[in-house]
Every structure is written in C-alpha cells, then in structure tokens.
Image: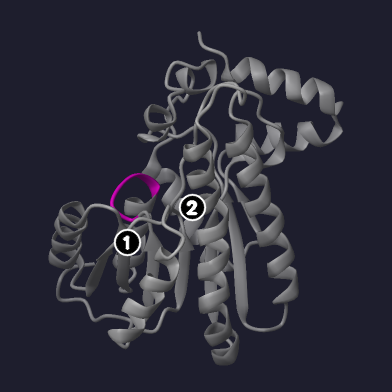
Amino acid sequence: MTASTKSSGLTALITGGSGGIGLELAKQFAAHGHDLVLTARSRDTLEAVAGTIEGKHGVKVTVIADDLTDPDAPQRLFDAIAAENIHIHFLVNNAGFGLGGEFVDTDIKRELEMVQVNIIALMQLTKMYLPAMVKRKSGHILNLASTAAFQPGPLMSVYYASKAFVLSFSEALDEELRNTGVSVTCLCPGATATKFAETAGVGNSKLFATIGGTTAEQVALYGHEAMMKGERVAVVGTRNKIMVQAERFAPRKLVTMLSRKAQENR
C-alpha cells in the first residue's frame, strides 16, 4: 500500500504507539488504510513515527503525548480525541511495563504506576470507547497481555498479576459482547525482542536470554489478524501455545517454581 491509497475512514487508537509492539501494530493498521491516533510520553518520537507512517501509507496520524501513569491521563486523552471529532473504531490497549525483583525489595511507587497503566488505564479507555462501538454495532478492542497471564510470576509478581487481570477481563468482556458486533481480543506474546526486558530490569534473566527469533513485527502481525477475525485469546507462537496448555494440567506449585527459575538471572 502506498501514499496514494485511499483511507478506509476508520481510526485506530493505539496506546504506547511510539515503539515496540505498539509501533508495529500502528504499521499494520496503516497498511490496511486505517487512520491512527497514537499516544505515548514522547511527543518528538510520536511525531517522527507519524511522519514516517503518513509518508508511506497516506493515512492520517494524530499524535497525543501523555503519560498513562497519571490517573487523569485517560480522560485527557478521551477529551482530546473528542475535541478533534475523531471516532475510534479500533482500540488497542498496548501501553504497559514490568518490574523485576523480589516484592519485598521493589519500589512501590513504580508498582502502583504499573497497575495504573497495565490495568486501570486499559479498563478506563475500554469503558470510554465501548458504548459508541456497541451503539454502532461494530468495533474491535485489542488488549495486550502476555503468556505471563497464565501463571504466577515470582520475581515479577505484580507484572504477572496485572496481565492475569487483562486476560480475565478481556475474556469476560468478549463474552458479554457476543452478538453485539464488537469483539475483544487478548493478545498474549511470550518474550519478545523489544526494550521491555531492559526497562523492567530483567534483561539478564533466563527467560529473556532465550527469546530466539520472536520480533515485535511478528507479534503485531499475528495480533492484528486475530483482532480482525474476532478471536478471543491469541497466544503467539507454537511453543507458547504448548506451554500454556501444559500449565493447565501441571500442579500449580510446580508451575510457580518453574516460573521463578525462568525469571532468575543466568
């Protein structure tokens, strides 16, 4: 698709859209002719991304710089988009981060910010945009969880718990919305080559030392396709699918012990 391609007239809002999986998802939506609203903390980075995407795909990209660790940010974002008279047809709750370490030692301020971004902002934005989707009888929501959602995560306990919320919330909401024309997809990638591990301080863990060839682009392609098909849960990669199924039958204590070993440093 080139800059001369006609826009679909539909718009996707992507949080955390300036890098990693969020940026690759933005490229997927743009490649299908959808306009974008991208939000992240850095306006300069967002504007650079917007210029590149607009130049390549000919879609309109609106950028709104804000920090979702601020409890007032979701409302500000919603109001700013409404002021531009932009209607959101695809909501991608991608923003999120992790924090490694034993809970007794970790920074509670950072963990509260994590809950604010990973859980509360995701839930708030969904609450804000869902009514219009239901009224139109069309729309898709993509919530970014993780394979971490399926198990406890010693040494990243709050992060794993936050993703378990995202998975449970998404599955329940998608069932509520059955027959409304609106779907909710929970995207669950495993360890992916982004800046996540570095930011969380777990880049030296056994888990991230064995990332392999999984890229943000591959995750975004899989997630976008799953969302458009209306799939409820999308686990990325055959290995991760097998792992998730195996965890259902393994003793919970064993799963937790193995999870801890994966989080320990090499």
Image: 191 above or below 163: above
Check residue 39 in the rendering and tell me which mark sits there, or answer none.
1
Count the numbered circles shown. 2
Q: Which percent across, then down, holds residue 29?
A: 36, 65
Circle number at residue 117: 2
Q: Quadrant of residue 79?
A: bottom left
Task: Report which quarter residue 74 is drawn in.
Answer: bottom left
Residue under the point 34% across and 51% down:
24
**How many neighbours does mark 2 have within 10 angstroms: few (below 14), some (14-19), or many (20 or more)?**
many
Is 171 magenta? The answer is no
Q: Residue at x 13, y 62 (%)?
A: 51
Residue 19 part of the magenta-drawn span: yes
For label 1, the SS is: strand
Residue type, numbered disc 2 = Val
Residue 36, image quadrant: bottom left
Horizontal arrangement in the rendering, residue 57 relative to residue 209 (left or right): left
**Secondary structure under the numbered disc 2 in the rendered image:** helix
Of pointers 1 and 2, the one earlier in the residue sequence: 1
Q: Which mark is residue 208?
A: none
- Judged by its main secondary structure, the magenta piece is loop
Hey, what amino acid is under mark 1?
Thr
Residue at coordinates 77% horizontally, 32% vertically from top-left? 247
Q: Is residue 103 above or below residue 117?
A: above
Front residue (pair 32, 186): 186
| Spot occupied by residue 259 in the image (x, y as percentages of width and height) | 67, 23
Left or right of 78, for residue 210: right
Q: Which residues are magenta?
A: 17-21
Q: Give the vertical position of 265 relative to 85 (above or below).
A: above
Label 1 vs label 2, nearer the camera = 2
Label 1, residues with CA under 10 Å away: few <14, some 14-19, many ≥20: many
